[in-house]
Image: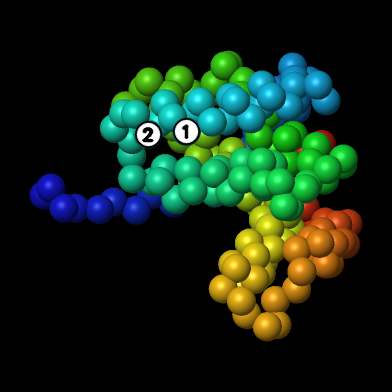
Amino acid sequence: MPNTTIHIDFELTGSDIDFFRERLKSAQKKFGSSGEDKIINGAEALIKRIESGKFPDFIAPRLARLREMLAMLKDRDWRLEGEDRQHVLNALSYFADPKDLVPDSIPGIGLLDDAIMIDLSVIELAPELGGYAEFCANRDELQRGMPDAEPLSVARDILQNRMRRQRRRSVRLGDWG
């Protein structure tokens, strides 16, 4: 039975999501608006800790999404600033908080809370992640000399403005900060 796969499906209700939202707000309060380096370093440390050991397969695609969120903050061409930047930092603050709901060291399930928070953050940051992905694709086209690619500053302005409009219009899980 070594190649057997079990699919576990569960549903988070509104009160479940509220529970995770409260944990996130608690982490946000710890770091405030001055904890940017701690948040980024904490999320990067989580990735390194996970990658340095054996981790469940369900976490791999989520680590990729966590890396995307960090890349948005660190990309000098994307220049995410102000409220937009703080929105992403707020979503990442949970991963820098040493008080984990489920200790990561518990084999098999220790990363379950992190996986849930990554998934919730991806939902909350959908406009940002989508805009950033398009920006990176445009930058790749520019580097390949594609004639229809926008200059970086133009693409950034268009995509960040669209990202803000989408965020304002979207029906969200709630205010994550």
- What is the crowding at mark 2: few (fewer than 14 residues within 10 Å), some, or many (at least 20)? few
Tell me whether the residue at label 2 lies in contact with that at label 1, contact meaning CB atoms closer than 8 angstroms: yes
> Amino acid under label 1?
Ile
Q: Residue furthest left?
A: 1
> Amino acid under label 2?
Glu
Q: Is residue 174 visible?
A: no
Q: Which mark is residue 51?
A: 2
Q: Is residue 140 above or below residue 67?
A: below
Seen at 66% across and 41% down, the residue is 74
- What is the crowding at mark 1: few (fewer than 14 residues within 10 Å), some, or many (at least 20)? some
Q: Position of residue 34 (x, y in %)?
A: 81, 21
Seen at 52% across and 34% down, the residue is 114
Q: Is residue 26 above or below residue 128?
A: above
Seen at 61% across and 45% down, the residue is 71
Q: Name the quadrant containing residue 157.
A: bottom right
Residue placed under numbered mark 1 in the picture: 47
- Per the image, label 2 sits on a secondary structure element best described as helix
Left or right of 61? Residue 137 is right
Q: Position of residue 120 (x, y in %)?
A: 63, 45
Q: Name the quadrant containing residue 69.
A: top right
- Per the image, label 1 sits on a secondary structure element best described as helix
Q: Is residue 67 visible?
A: yes
Q: CA distance from mark 2 to mark 1?
A: 6 Å
Q: Which mark is residue 135?
A: none
Seen at 42% across and 42% down, the residue is 59
Q: Position of residue 130 (x, y in %)?
A: 68, 62
Q: Is residue 19 above or below residue 35?
A: below
Q: Name the quadrant containing residue 85.
A: top right
